[in-house]
Image (tube, rainbow, N blue to C red):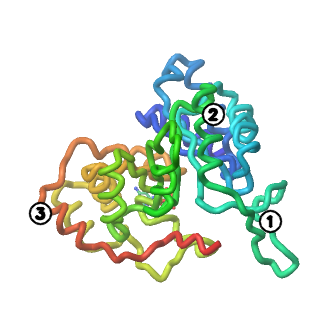
Amino acid sequence: GSCLESVKIAIDTGYRHIDGAFVYYNEHEVGQAIRDKIAEGRIKREDIFYCGKLWNTCHPPELVRPTLEKTLKILQLDYVDLYIIELPMAFKPGDAIYPKDENGKIIYHETDLCATWEAMEACKDAGLAKSIGVSNFNRRQLEMILNKPGLKYKPVSNQVECHPYFTQPKLLEFCRQHDIVIVGYSPLGTSRDETWVNVSSPPLLKDPVLNAIGKKYNKTAAQVALRFSIQRGVVVIPKSFNPQRIRENFQIFDFSLTEKEMKEIEALNKNVRYVELLM
Ligand code: A2P
C-alpha cells in the first residue's frame, strides 16, 4: 500500500514520470494510483510518462509482447510511455525471476539482443509502448543495436546508475552524440541496503561539497545532487516513500548551480558503482 500512496502524493506534487518494472511487484499499485488520479480529474493519461521494463527471463523475442501485455494488464492501462530492456543479459525463461542451478548459480540463457530489440520495435508498432529503450547497456551493447541491419527505431534512452559519485562521463557523451537520453537511477546514492548495494562507497548525501553548496541555496544535499543531474541533461528518478522527501525532491526548479559548482560536483566522481549487478 505504501507505493499506491506515494505515487498519489507524487502526482499531486507534480511528478509525471514514473519509473516502474514488473520485478518491483508493485505495478498494480502504480496503475491504481494513476487511474485514481485520472478519475479525480487531476491528470489525463497523456500527462503521465510511465516506464516499464522487460525482465531478464523474458528476452526470447516471442516472450516480449506477452510480457508487456501482462504488465499492461496489471497496470490496467492501454500503453506504457516507455518500455525498456532492463538488463543486457538473459536468464532462463520460466516462473523463477532468478533461476538457479543446484549450486545456487544463476542459469543464463543464450539470446540475441538484436532479436529482442526487434520484438521491442514490434511492441511500439502495435501501440503498446510509445517509445522503447534500454537499461544498464554499455557502449558496446548500444552499438550492437545502433548498428543492427534494418534497425527501425533507435533506443530513445539508456537507464543507468548516475549521480555525483558515478557521473558516467564517457557513456553520457556517447549517448549525447546518438540522441539517447540517459536516465540516472540511484540519483541519491541508493537506500544503502546491503543485500544489493556496494556500501564500501561512502554515503552520497553526507558529502561535504554537496552539503556546502546546498547551504548556499538553502537546499539539501539531495536537492543539489538532483539539480546537478538535471542540469547536465540526465533524467533523475529519485525514490522515496516519505511524503516530505517526495516533495523535497521536487523543489529543484527554483535554483541553478553555477558552472564552477557543476565542475566541483563533477570532480566528486569516484567511478565506483553502488549497484554492481554482480549477476
Ligand atoms: P525514503 O524512501 O525513506 O525517503 P535513490 O533514489 O538514489 O535510490 O535513493 C533512495 C533512498 O534515498 C531511499 O532510501 C529514500 O528513503 C532516500 N531518500 C529519498 N529522498 C531523500 C532525501 N530528500 N533526503 C534523504 N534521503 C532521501
Depth check, mark 1 against mark 3: the one in front is 1
Mark 2 nearby-residue class (10 Å; few <14, some 14–19, many ≥20): many
What's the residue type where badge 2 is placed? Cys
For this rendering, which residue is in front, 140 or 156? 140
Which residue matches tag 3? 260
- Residue 51 position, x and y percent, is 54, 41
Which mark, by number, is residue 99?
Answer: 1
In the figure, is residue 243 to the left or right of 34? Answer: left
The residue carrying mark 2 is 123
Q: Where is residue 262 shown, x and y percent of the image?
A: 19, 61
Which of disc 2 and disc 3 is earlier in sequence? 2
Q: Quadrant of the C terminus?
A: bottom right
Of helix, strand and loop, which one carries label 1? Answer: loop
**Label 1, residues with CA under 10 Å away: few <14, some 14-19, many ≥20:** some
**Up-down relation of residue 256 to residue 18 (above or below):** below
Which disc number belongs to residue 66? none
Marks 3 and 2, how far apart in space?
44 Å
Mark 3 residue crowding within 10 angstroms, few (<14) / some (14–19) / many (20+): few
Residue 79 seen in render: yes
Picture quarter with the N terminus? top right
